[in-house]
Image (cartoon, rainbow, N blue to C red):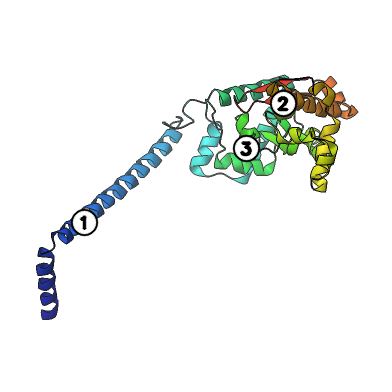
């Protein structure tokens, strides 16, 4: 104890001659106190928010100060009850069946209109970013019931669900460079149409598509690419009217026309399938082309 006391006195005498050490110790102490107060405040805020969310759920109110405040709640009253009190697999099955029934009852016109509204929300900066609750995600285990199948480009700037402001289970998306039809992409669309019973098929190209630009190179240059890539580009090239495209002087107009021509070619290929056209004639399916303008966020629909 005497040794400890002596060491403390020696330390005290030492730091008295070094005021900068004293100030440093004081600063560290103040910072520590402030950090503890901040952590305590943050914990209290989180607890308050959690209690408020629970209370809002019990009273049927939308969570305040969140992205859901300006749109209807994602589920019905039973969904809210399930979230608060737990839910069974049977409840999830019932919810999935209810969602499937609603999707089945919609017409292609209604589905396409909803898709257009979603894109309008996106480019206007009013996207709702619909998220599924834990209950709804569990219901999706039972089955999927998308209303739209999209054949789009794999370009990182064209995330289909975001562009159309759709959530989990809303879209069946097939993405490949140049949104081209081949065995795998065609088979994927056929699965969506015949088994998932989608109401709308969208073939969507986009502004500044690298695959479309590359497909307009001369054949010898394209064949220098890896075999599979060259095959895909030559497939796209075969569907382009390059002589007509060369007559367009404005680069941006030429880009749009080339992309649109490729989309039209894919739509026409799909229209050659008698089974698909039978559904179209019965008003059970719509096949449309679309052009996504990266610079504005707007999707233009055509060729339907």
Give the residue displayed 61% in from the left and 34% down from the top.
Answer: 167
* Image quarter (top left, top right, bottom left or bottom right) of the N terminus: bottom left
Viewer-nearest of labels 2 and 3? 2
Q: Is residue 28 left or right of residue 84?
A: left
- How far is disc 2 from disc 1 in space, using C-alphas? 64 Å
Whether 194 is drawn above or below 87: the answer is above
Q: Quadrant of residue 283?
A: top right
> Mark 2 or mark 3, which has the lower sequence index?
3
Specify few, some or many for label 2: CA neighbours under 10 Å numbering under 14, 14-19, or 20 or more.
some
Q: Name the spot of residue 116 as percent of width and height, x first.
A: 65, 22
Work out whether residue 169 or residue 214 is closer to the camera in this orientation and state it.
Answer: 214
Work out whether residue 210 or residue 266 is closer to the camera in this orientation and state it.
Answer: 210
Q: Is residue 166 visible?
A: no
Callout 1: helix, strand or loop? Answer: helix
Whether 52 is drawn above or below 120: the answer is below
Viewer-nearest of labels 3 and 1? 1
Q: Name the spot of residue 77 as percent of width and height, x first.
A: 53, 32
Give the residue displayed 74% in from the left and 33% down from the top.
Answer: 213
* Image quarter (top left, top right, bottom left or bottom right) of the C terminus: top right
Give the residue displayed 57% in from the left and 24% down from the top.
Answer: 123
Q: Name the spot of residue 92 as percent of width and height, x first.
A: 62, 41
Q: Is residue 74 left or right of residue 218?
A: left
The residue carrying mark 3 is: 168
Q: How many marks overall?
A: 3
> Mark 3 or mark 1, which has the lower sequence index?
1
Q: Quadrant of residue 264?
A: top right
Specify few, some or many for label 1: CA neighbours under 10 Å numbering under 14, 14-19, or 20 or more.
few
> Mark 2 or mark 1, which has the lower sequence index?
1
Identify the mark at residue 29; answer none if there is no mark.
1
Callout 3: helix, strand or loop? Answer: loop
The residue carrying mark 2 is: 255
Q: Is residue 67 visible?
A: yes
């Amino acid at each position: 104890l005497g040794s400890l006391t002596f060491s403390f006195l020696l330390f005290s005498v030492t730091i008295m001659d070094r005021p900068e050490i004293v100030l440093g110790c004081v600063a560290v102490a103040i910072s520590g106190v402030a950090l503890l107060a901040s952590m305590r405040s943050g914990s209290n805020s989180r607890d308050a928010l959690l209690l408020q969310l629970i209370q809002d759920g019990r009273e049927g109110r939308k969570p305040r100060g969140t992205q859901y405040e300006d749109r209807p709640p994602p589920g019905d009253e039973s969904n809210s009850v399930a979230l608060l009190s737990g839910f069974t697999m049977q409840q999830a099955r019932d919810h999935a069946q209810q969602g499937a029934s609603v999707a089945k009852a919609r017409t292609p016109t209604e589905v396409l209109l909803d898709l257009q509204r979603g894109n309008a929300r996106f480019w206007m900066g009013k996207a709702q970013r619909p998220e599924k609750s834990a209950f709804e995600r569990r219901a999706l285990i039972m089955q999927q019931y998308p209303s739209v199948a999209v054949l789009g480009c794999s370009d990182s700037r064209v995330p289909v669900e975001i562009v159309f402001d759709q959530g989990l289970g809303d879209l069946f998306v097939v993405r490949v460079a140049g949104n081209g039809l081949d065995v795998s992409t065609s088979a994927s669309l056929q699965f969506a149409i015949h088994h998932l019973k989608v109401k709308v098929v969208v073939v969507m190209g986009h502004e500044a598509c690298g695959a479309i630009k590359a497909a307009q190179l001369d054949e010898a240059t394209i064949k220098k690419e890896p075999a599979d890539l060259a095959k895909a580009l030559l497939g796209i090239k075969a569907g382009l009217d390059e002589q007509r495209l060369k007559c367009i002087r404005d680069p941006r107009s030429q880009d749009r026309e080339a992309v649109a021509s490729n989309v039209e070619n894919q739509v026409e290929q799909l229209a050659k399938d008698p089974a698909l056209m039978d559904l179209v004639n019965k008003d059970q399916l719509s096949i449309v082309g679309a052009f996504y303008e990266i610079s504005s966020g707007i999707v233009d629909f055509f060729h339907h």
